[in-house]
Amino acid sequence: MTAPVYGAGYGDVRLPADAGVILSMFQAIGLTKSYRRGRPPALLDLSFDARQGQVTALLGPVGSGRTTALLLALGLERGRGAALFDGRPYRRIRCPEREVGVVLSEHDRPPRHPDRRARGHLRMLAAAAGVPARRAEQMLEQTRLVGAGEHRLRTFSPGMNRRLALAEALLGDPRTLLLDEPTQDLSPKNCEWFHAVLRAFAAGGGTVLVTVRSPQEAAALADRVVTLEHGRLLADQPVAEFLRTRLHDEVSVAGPRIGRLADLLTQSGAQVRREGGARISVGGVSRTEIGELAFRHGILLHELADRPGTVSAEPTAVAPATEAPEAVAAPPAGVGIPAGQRAEQRHSRLQPVRQSTRTSVGPPARQPAETAQPVQSTRPAEEVAQLAQVVPQATDSETGETVVVLTPGAVVSASVVVQQPAAGPRTSSAGDVQ
Amino acid sequence: MKALTYERRRLTGVRSTWLIVLAVLVLDAALAEVTVRQAALAEPVRVLTAGVPLLPLPLAAIGAGALGALSYGHEIRYPGLRPLLLAPRRRLALLLAKLTVIGVVSALLALATLTLDAVLLHLAGDAGAFEHALLHGRFPQALAGFVALVVAGGWIGLLAAGLLRSAAAGLLVLVALPLLVEPVLSLLRGDALLPPRGLGLSRLHAFYPVDTRHAWFYGPLSGLRGALPLSSVALATLVAAPVLVLLTGYLLLLPRRRGI
């Protein structure tokens, strides 16, 4: 059923000849985990590289084999294939804690004695890693746990536990970090902190392999995204390519007559998902088209916004590779926020929402700034108005442009320009919100 | 990997260690006090080792066994070291460190018990001859046997917990061993319990210790009194044999396992 591609020579696999060219710190070759009869393999022939100086994300839904891949790479589970750290399997490394730091998923039970105090725990593990005890103190400082050093581990929150796990992994000053869902279920602040630490680690020449569940997080965190599904490799791409091809655009739409719009959208072939009474999220159709459709049928909209963290997947809206990180630079703030909270934010703030077809926007110098603007939603109203003024100018060529300015308790105005460069914006007041 | 330092920090960092030591010492003192007050029982060695007739082992040995069992139980329940222990030599190093640390702690626990009970015996004031002998360097063999028994108890708990991957199982093995030793021993000696024809169903009771004059209450390892007359060499063998058997078993399994 599952034929191993690379034989079973577990310890005998050597780096290929071009290993010197590609500076590869971690290499997975044909990792396969199959069960006995009847069950599909948890992982089938997974091969990828994690390079030095990069964060590599192993992305996939729950049950797609990410954790299995990590456990196989470490040799904690039996399976086929090989995983090489600098050309050696984990078991053959003389001092693995000096080379590879591991943060395994803790689920609901952290693998630490609850009666122990954080400082004593780290000192104990420092001894296990063969480093002096003052290194434990350093790690407490680096993970901002000094204040909690004398607290018992049973009092630690999930976020503190995760930071302590990172401190443990970093004790031996490793060059490679393997993390299993380090930011799952953490607060946005902790997530950001984790991202910053991992990025800094990679920037310092380390290799980071991290499993993540959400594509948005993968895009925000990683330089390279390896996508898994049902234990199979779906894609192995640099983040720019990942953003272009794999992230689906979802548009959040809210309004009093949303059911009608949902029907219309479904008829036109979009994927519509209901999110409560007056809100849907739409995939496969750009925001421009939704706005047009609503306008044409006279449907009042209270909200029309891209999901934070997603970027447009339209074929025409291909972002240049250099711009891609900026386009997603802001979203991490919203990554961990529950949907309800996000919606609240959107309602309570004056927020310009715009989408442009980037290939045709006039001055290229202005582009990055404009891309970043929509997320900085705290700007004053005049500026927003200015922005709304700017937009029609930028759409002098044959582009579609929608500007929806939402002010709570005020007029919702939507200006739609469709292939009428000479006529200027045709503005229509869709109705009063109140 | 500094396994010894690790194990020392691990052992002293958890509360259960101190609780067990404290409980053993308090119970020992209480038992010694009770024994001292009953003139019929107040044999000096018995007071010093705080033996309980109902327990198969001295309290200190059970305490040491609990420390040993929790030592591996801790690694299994909180597998933070799992990736580091993949290499068999690491596990061997950890085993040796644990054996050393638990051995030392067990010996200290035995000595503390003896010291504490000696103080109580002295305060009771009617064991002058015994103390005189002790002060002149004539220790009864039973005291050395007691220390050896406590150390062996710690090791048996440790090794059984490692072998069976559970602290509870380790402690259970330790407590059950003395009960099993006597019938097995009498079987090996062929103490007329077994007819030459072999073992019929009707003779299965020969395996149970209950019928051998109710001496199973004490167990040969308890150092108090056994049903079978044993020489000191035989007793020493009895104490060392389970340790060696468990150690061999663990070492045989060590390269074949991925974890502890």
Image (spheres, grey):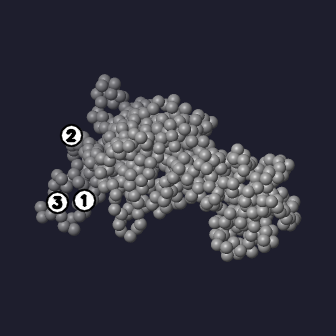
Tell which circle, 2 or 1, labels the residue nearer the N-terminal end. 1
Depth order, front residue of A257/A340: A257
The answer for which chain carries disc 1 is: B
Q: Which residue is identified by label 1?
A: B207
Neighbours of disc 2 within 10 Å: few (<14), some (14-19), many (20+): few
Query: Residue at horizontal 22%, vertical 51%?
Result: B185
Q: Is residue B11 visible?
A: no
Name the amino acid type tagged 2.
Answer: Val
Tell me where residue B153 sits by quadrant: top left
Residue B198 in picture, x, y percent from top left: 15, 63
> Do the CB atoms of the residues marked 2 and 3 lie less than 8 Å apart?
no
- Mark 2 and mark 1 on one chain: yes
Q: Residue shown at 28%/27% (left/top)?
A: B138
* Residue type, mark 3 in image: Leu
Q: Would residue B147 be seen by someone viewing this image from the given angle?
A: yes
Q: Tag 1: residue type?
A: Phe
Image vertical order of residue B123 relative to residue A56, above or below: above
Residue beneath label 2, please?
B233
In the rendered image, residue A381, in percent from the top left (x then y), is placed at 84, 50
Percent position of residue A225, x then y: 52, 52
Answer few, some or many: residues within 10 Å of disc 3's Cα (few below 14, many 20 plus, some between 14 and 19). Answer: some
**Residue behind mark 3:** B194
Distance CA(mark 2)–CA(mark 3): 25 Å
Q: Is residue B113 above or below residue A251?
A: above
- CB contact under 8 Å: marks 3 and 1: no
